[in-house]
Amino acid sequence: MSGIWGNNLRLSIFGESHGKGIGIVINGLPMGLEIDLELVDKEMKRRAPGRNKISSQRKEEDSFEIVSGYFNNRTTGTPLCAIIYNKDKKSQDYDKIKNLLRPGHADYTGYIKYEGFYDYRGGGHFSGRLTAPLVFAGAIAKQILIKKNICFGSHILSIGHVQDDIFDLVDIDDSVIDYLIKKDFPVINDERGKEMMESIEKVRLEEDSLGGIIETAILNLQAGLGEPFFDSIESKLSQLLFSIPGVKGVEFGKGFEITRLKGSQANDEYYIKDGEVMTYTNNNGGILGGITNGMPVIFRTAIKPTSSIGIKQRTVDIKHMKNSEIEVKGRHDPCIVPRAIPVVEAVSALSILDLLME
Amino acid sequence: MSGIWGNNLRLSIFGESHGKGIGIVINGLPMGLEIDLELVDKEMKRRAPGRNKISSQRKEEDSFEIVSGYFNNRTTGTPLCAIIYNKDKKSQDYDKIKNLLRPGHADYTGYIKYEGFYDYRGGGHFSGRLTAPLVFAGAIAKQILIKKNICFGSHILSIGHVQDDIFDLVDIDDSVIDYLIKKDFPVINDERGKEMMESIEKVRLEEDSLGGIIETAILNLQAGLGEPFFDSIESKLSQLLFSIPGVKGVEFGKGFEITRLKGSQANDEYYIKDGEVMTYTNNNGGILGGITNGMPVIFRTAIKPTSSIGIKQRTVDIKHMKNSEIEVKGRHDPCIVPRAIPVVEAVSALSILDLLME
Amino acid sequence: MSGIWGNNLRLSIFGESHGKGIGIVINGLPMGLEIDLELVDKEMKRRAPGRNKISSQRKEEDSFEIVSGYFNNRTTGTPLCAIIYNKDKKSQDYDKIKNLLRPGHADYTGYIKYEGFYDYRGGGHFSGRLTAPLVFAGAIAKQILIKKNICFGSHILSIGHVQDDIFDLVDIDDSVIDYLIKKDFPVINDERGKEMMESIEKVRLEEDSLGGIIETAILNLQAGLGEPFFDSIESKLSQLLFSIPGVKGVEFGKGFEITRLKGSQANDEYYIKDGEVMTYTNNNGGILGGITNGMPVIFRTAIKPTSSIGIKQRTVDIKHMKNSEIEVKGRHDPCIVPRAIPVVEAVSALSILDLLME
Amino acid sequence: MSGIWGNNLRLSIFGESHGKGIGIVINGLPMGLEIDLELVDKEMKRRAPGRNKISSQRKEEDSFEIVSGYFNNRTTGTPLCAIIYNKDKKSQDYDKIKNLLRPGHADYTGYIKYEGFYDYRGGGHFSGRLTAPLVFAGAIAKQILIKKNICFGSHILSIGHVQDDIFDLVDIDDSVIDYLIKKDFPVINDERGKEMMESIEKVRLEEDSLGGIIETAILNLQAGLGEPFFDSIESKLSQLLFSIPGVKGVEFGKGFEITRLKGSQANDEYYIKDGEVMTYTNNNGGILGGITNGMPVIFRTAIKPTSSIGIKQRTVDIKHMKNSEIEVKGRHDPCIVPRAIPVVEAVSALSILDLLME
């Protein structure tokens, strides 16, 4: 039942990578909303492959068609369905390696779970391509949130061993976000950005891949958003972030580092500034007891290296149950991290909007 | 609405730290189940304070009373409600500091969210004490899962800067779990365990606190459990793990470290062993595409240092909106990590059981 | 999983008739609400048995204890749990007839569903007594709704063959509700009320029972409440109404009678009155397309005769699988209809509040 | 949020009558299921208009396209999305009467709820056309259920004042269902069927309309299905039945009539037949305590007369807020009852399947 999510804004996703199409039904959108489709398109393009050397050379156009819930250029308030029809499919690529489990992918787990009935082509329903409808929905959510001044900014904190500067947990403001959103390869330190791109180009030539960490800030969230326990900000965000294929870790504020501090260092002490309660530090990433405290919400998402690599790997032929080898040829991203950024931001926007609608 | 969780096994928690009691309603338990109440009690005691120097000297007895759903020593199949009545309360402790926001706690966010109506005493509904009902439910879940051979084992991977040995992601087996469960302070490397306890004793005397990381293994999960996207194993586990007060990071398999590997290193290659599909490595922590692959499921949970410390801290008097100071005196845990282990395991057991019932 | 209900206001009920107690956890109540506990108590008493000859002579005191979510006489906004401890239990009554299926009750279906593990005493979790927590929650919901002027009124439309006057579907107003709420045996036509009471007294002496129909009006609902399809007003109300033990039919507006009209008679034509859109008739009971149109919402609920009767009935001994006979002696209501009224109103209030919170 | 339904089988519907299309996403279908698309088509045709004189002369082809979740002629186990693209649309018909509220329709309530943003053409999202996706899903559910021998049969119990014979609540068997399914106009008593058709033809010529009652039987349901309280069989069925546009009443077993019986008449007494527990009567319609008892489940659904009629009606011009008149010309069904039968059966099948998957 995992294709449906949300308490107030409710999403239902569907589709397979090489089927007729992929899509989403969004319940609970406010009515009368004029969607800026160009902005949606721009977000879709941030995720789309084929933009440059460091991403897959596939040309998925990702052009969505709104089937329902949108009338006279405004949301109706009833379920909005959007479909992205699959075009640039090379399904025969997959038939050849149909029985060979691609390491790092869901081929084996999908095979076991769905007893061989699932659409194995291009990862089927497990494909990263299923994040496109989430980006679509997230782009709408962002448009609603920006009216409340809530905005999302991310940078590539690391690619492999190359590290960007870290966000200032306290002093980050909208200008940083404006700065990052304009960049094709969003880093704070351009020197490091160049190194990252070089290391990606290097593994591309080796037919290998790299992963990395995305650091995201949500700004201008009022204090008091979120719920104790099961719908804490961290719970909501992490549930969706871990839905993104390839994510293996999520941390908030100082994250794992906070465990190396003493309480007297980790606690964010309070003071009053211009009649507002503020904290001197922001080790908790703007969240206490699952609820926002008005400081920037900061989190990090670990993305594993792209599973599809051309290098020969040991694997198993699941049909004949014997050891084998595989080389996953084709047009793969040597590093998925830049394309994952709009997805991370989209699910964040969806989580925040769902909580705001509580 | 965050007090209700689950698709098939559905929990509803309630209560405040210093109110009449805390409790849980569990829907969806199988009928006819004879609960080993001693085992439940044992799990409750693992979480309970007052056991030794490193935990709070409060004596919460945490004795639960089953109100419904249990008849003739067996579950009836209808909702099981259990209540833990609050006893050893010193609510006046809190009245004194009622308007002083305790740094690191949910005092401020609770105040804002509930507009001053919430029960501020001892954290109210935000209290770590609310994890006791989860341990109760988790202890029942564990009893159901062990019949399928599924078991849970954890150790303290680190306290502050002191690091235990890491689990072998591939070769871990039930004997490790048996070894750890017997220990009052579960570490693999006893030398390091001693160092950890010493550092905890040190901060206790300083009226400061420490955090740490818990590493958990779930063994003998069959391949094919979990769902793509919103109910992935990682999504389900992280949602509940981040519900636990003080958790700031969650990672699976190699976690954040996997971002420093190349795809050719990170991918877990397959081979056949005794007619079973296995992987040589387990960097993905037993989960691919959100679904178990039959290898051990391994994850790490970052717990921040206890927020309650005796050291003087800067804060704000929320009623008079002025800067102030606070010393949180009382019987606090200098390090909550050991007591958090049964909670981490409990929510893991609940997540797995919910998915198994799909 | 049927013990949990609601999208925004979420209820979790638990308990058995002869166990330790019955109760409810209410999620989503607004914070800072001062509950008029006397009004709650009054609603509880409307449902409670033992008030007069026509109801059971059991004295269930139905005194509830609020365990959580209520602090300084106000709701905290966190889950509110209330428990009614069972007192006047005569469980041995039930042990004698333990294996004899009481006709009309859930003994057989409960036995099959829960494989003999359920608490058979007094109907266990199936007991009508489980409606007491619903009345508790409904009484709170009513207090919230009355602030928006929304009120609920019901009368006994029929007992057996004796019929009260029907509500005027268009002209009903608050004065009718004020009139009915004060009556112990709420009917419009007192002559018919007397006849009803006589017929109840007659079957009581025969150790038999009677059923009847309750007609309910919800007044001052603004137009535009409800949702198309699965959360239509009719869907929401009927789901909860059919949760009440003994309900076998629900109809809105003209209900089944509307099928005998032509479209030109059934359609409620519009006109403008004092700047408001009104309808001349109200055959649709204030609901079109699942959504309120501002006219009174009127519905009827059919309650079957009390299943517990002293008269000898044919039945089966389920343990020995042989035909047998049963006389259900004890303190039974010869007619449950008057006591069902506050339950019908309670679930209506809960449904409406849940929709209003959308 | 009313576009999503179900606990285990989860549906998400979308679309508007005159938009691009209408559709459904079905989560939770078993994998590897070969859908008999011809049977699906046959069910769709039972609902489709244009089949004969007594139904609308519109030719909606209702041909569905499966977008996802179906691979190599089998369900994959992942979300199945099907779309019916709208073809034979005459939207200009509606532009003319755009501001005139059609009595009996959701024009006014939709206008208020969605503040004028909803797609008013042909009822938009409120259109009866939205039941086509439900019939699609129901046809799949039926195919799954028939493997467990569970089948659904309905007849037209009444049209206006003309009454068919009533089902035998006890002795009904599969042969009755076989008999009814073959009939274009399913009645038990053909004489009465002819009268019904004549009365429909009569109102058609008058440009008026008729309603009626559908009686449905679900056969071969094992005892023990359903849940106490919120997911009782009656609750589940009624929630979906009242989702169908035009339904104003639902009753089970004897329904409203049971209120005229005494307990000694209403109670279904037990006996043993061939080692099975049976009841002599079936006044409770196969359901006790919300759970099946193994007897046929019988219920009745009241369908109001078609709201669209050519006869002049008084109404309001909502834009100019003045009294007006309307004649709803076009191709309307003089009686929707026969076309509603497959919808009633579809939602019944979906409810039962959802409960069976519990």
Image: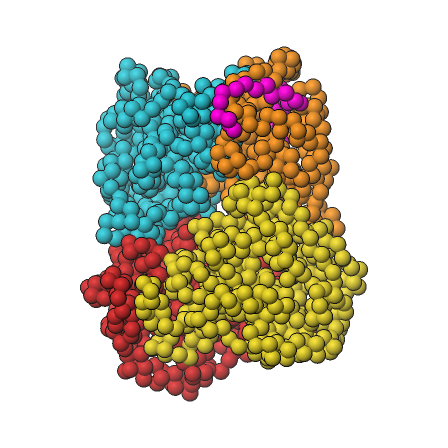
Chain colours: A orange, B cyan, C red, D yellow
Q: Is residue B240 left or right of residue B182?
A: right
Q: Residue at x 36, y 69 (%)?
A: D279
Q: Residue at x 66, y 59 (%)?
A: D45
Q: In the displayed structure, would residue D81 be above or below residue D59?
A: above
Which one is in front, D353 or C332? D353
Which one is in front, C347 or D172? D172
Residue C272: name its quadrant: bottom right
Q: In the displayed structure, would residue D243 be above or below residue D271?
A: above
Q: Is residue C135 visible?
A: no
Residue A155 lies, in percent from the top left, at: 60, 24
Which one is in front, A219 or D342? D342
Q: Determine the residue located farthest toward the bottom in the rendered image.
A: C191
Please say whether residue A321 is one of the residues in the magenta stretch.
yes
Q: Is residue B147 visible?
A: yes
Please say whether residue C253 is one of the residues in the magenta stretch.
no
Residue A24 lies, in percent from the top left, at: 62, 42
Q: Residue at x 32, y 69 (%)?
A: D270
Looking at the image, how many numbered discs can be counted on the residues?
Answer: 0
Residue A299 lies, in percent from the top left, at: 52, 28
Residue B306 lies, in percent from the top left, at: 36, 29
The region drawn magenta spans A318-342
Q: In the displayed structure, would residue D131 be above or below residue B260?
A: below
